[in-house]
Image: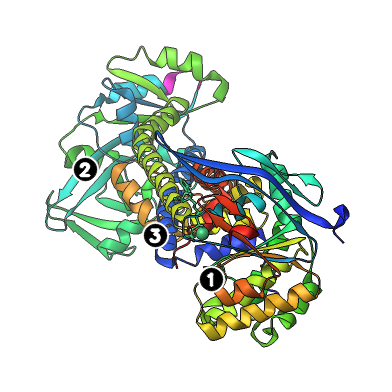
Amino acid sequence: MGISPTFGIGGLAWRNLTRRPFRTSLTVSGVSVAVALLASLLAFGKGYERELSRELDAMGIQMMLVPLGCPYDAAARVLKGNALDVSLPASAFVKAKQDSAVQDAAPLLMTTLPRPAEGRTDLWVGVTSEIRPLKPWWKLTEGSHWFSSDTSDSVILGAEAAETELRRVGDSFYSPETGRKFKVCGVLERSGTADDSQFFVPLKTAQSMFHQPDRLTAIAIRLKDPALTGEASTRLQTIPGAQVVTMTEMMGTFLNLVGSVRTLIQSLAALAVLISALSILTTMLSTVLERTNEIGLFRAMGASRSQVFGLLALESAFLAILGSVFGVLLAGVAGSGVERVVRSFVSLAPQGRLLALTSDVILQCCGVGLLIGIGAGVYPAWRASRLSPIEALRWEN
Amino acid sequence: MKSVDNVVLRAESLTKIYRRGVEEVRALDGVTFSIEEGEFVSIVGQSGSGKTTLLNLIGCMDTPTSGTIEIDGHETSRLSDRQSTRLRSEKIGFVFQHFGLIPTLSVEENIMLPTLFARRAAKGKASELLEQVGLSHRHKHRPHELSGGEMQRVAIARALINSPALLLADEPTGNLDSTNGEAILRLFTDLNRAGLTIIVVTHNPALADAAHRQLNLQDGHLLLESQL
Ligand SMILES: Nc1ncnc2c1ncn2[C@@H]1O[C@H](COP(=O)(O)OP(=O)(O)OP(=O)(O)O)[C@@H](O)[C@H]1O
Ligand SMILES: [Mg+2]
């Protein structure tokens, strides 16, 4: 004769879940959503930091000289390729370059160019060849060459910009907003950074095209030795109208920026966790209520209090485990959607994948899920364990 | 003929008082009797006379307000929860009017259920009991696929799985038609012939008469044979 291998206290608990499939799946979905939210949050935090440090590492830049104002905002905008409202005089660049600690310095003029017809905003960056050592990952595609002169009407397109504009090396390119005609002298290979979507022109060309003669929006700087950061920034800070932002400071700013969004998601996740715990609690309480006679019967046939407690605690643990598993799967599947939502909140998000659903994130989430199940299951299980065997008699069939 | 060694159950001045607010209900009042091993005893009496209350006290499901009970020589009226649980598991088999089968378990698993709580393997015993109650061919079925009579036979097999010293049944034929009731009666008679001690609360005259002896309750008092 065959006894199913699932027969045991655990099997009993498991099968009880199948009695009310609708209620069980509702409770499990509640836990799943909470766990998925939690998983996304944790994965986002991890992925964001990872991407950010990868991106900052890839930049050969250790500090930026930006116009006075909110330095972090300014530097963040420059880094992410947004334009600044105020600018630095060209003389600041000369002074920065003369500093003994500076290895490379590159002047930048960044301007946004709204394209209402296309529904987007382009970013034009005026650069000199001095930018090249600071962007070691830049690779020009086949046939490209650097600007022939520093005033030429040539443009180098980021990989994405080239795609959207449908231009290749050698094509001509007309910018109706500025009334200028360019020749595409180069296209950059895709780098996964903000550069991909930008338009690079010689600095002087940019200054005349946007009517900013001798103005700069930022100066990117690499030091001879990163250890010189402290003394160099003290000196550079004295340049009139300029202020220094180091990359280390930048990193903190980004993380803070995310902090507020994270708090939002965190409170949402906490709320979802609370709600799912409550839903397990009510599910288990009504289970105990419905099965009072049956539990009494178990007691009458020799089940101890701890066995009854274990049975009910297992049931709620199963609910939580199921919920956690589905939740993690959900986070994995819906991750890209969540990422899009997060990006819409955080305008200065790194380019790479933000969700890092690593094994410790999964473990943490399952841990929280299990904690929900155990926490919410204790009281109903305790109630059940206190039931008298006499309840077995009040059976209504 | 009566030897002290043969007494499996002894009740002494059993009293059970239920309190409902200020009102007291004397469900049992000074009940004294003893039952010998291998006896088949029925408890009869009008509704509310205290039959179920008495059976609960015997089965260690509840504690008396006063008086003592001895099962197999062990005083059981003042046990801790843990001890009475163990006693129920080892010495008592319960059969209820409502069968009390677990819908998610097969017939065989229902029968095995008490062994699970007792942490005891009794696989062979389960098939033996299924055979005895004539349901071997139904071992994989779920309770809802059985007739009332079959369900009660499964419940009886379940009550016997841990080899109890006492089988207690509260109106086991109460939910059955006369044909199925007779089948249960025959089963009880057979089990008793094989040596099982049975105490059955019943309104069913045939079942009550099949017993060796009747305990007659009236308003919580045990009537003497002379009073019948
Ligand atoms: N938990 C309780 N609380 C209060 N009073 C109770 C309780 N259980 C039983 N009683 C009362 O005790 C008396 C005996 O009840 P009991 O259930 O033992 O009767 P019974 O002989 O089994 O009746 P029936 O044949 O209807 O099953 C009744 O008056 C009943 O109302
Ligand atoms: Mg009764």
Amino acid of disc 1: Pro
Q: Which mark is residue A26?
A: 3
Which residue is located at x 34 percent, y 46 percent? Answer: A342
Q: Which mark is residue A260?
A: none
- Left or right, A199 with respect to B43, comes to left
Magenta segment range?
A97-101
Amino acid of disc 2: Thr
Q: Please tell me how crowded label 1 is: few (under 14), some (14-19), or many (20+) other residues with Cα within 10 Å.
A: some
Specify the quadrant that holds the N terminus of chain A.
bottom right
Give the secondary structure at mark 1: loop
Which residue is located at x 36 percent, y 41 percent? Answer: A271
**Label 1, on which residue?**
B103
Q: Please tell me how crowded label 2 is: few (under 14), some (14-19), or many (20+) other residues with Cα within 10 Å.
A: some
Q: Which mark is residue A112?
A: 2
Locate residue B38, reporting x and y percent.
79, 66
- Main SS of the magenta part reads loop
Nearer the observer: mark 1 or 3; the answer is: 1
- Looking at the rendered structure, whether the residues under marks 1 and 3 are on a common chain is answered as no
**Does the magenta-highlighted stretch encompass residue A98?**
yes
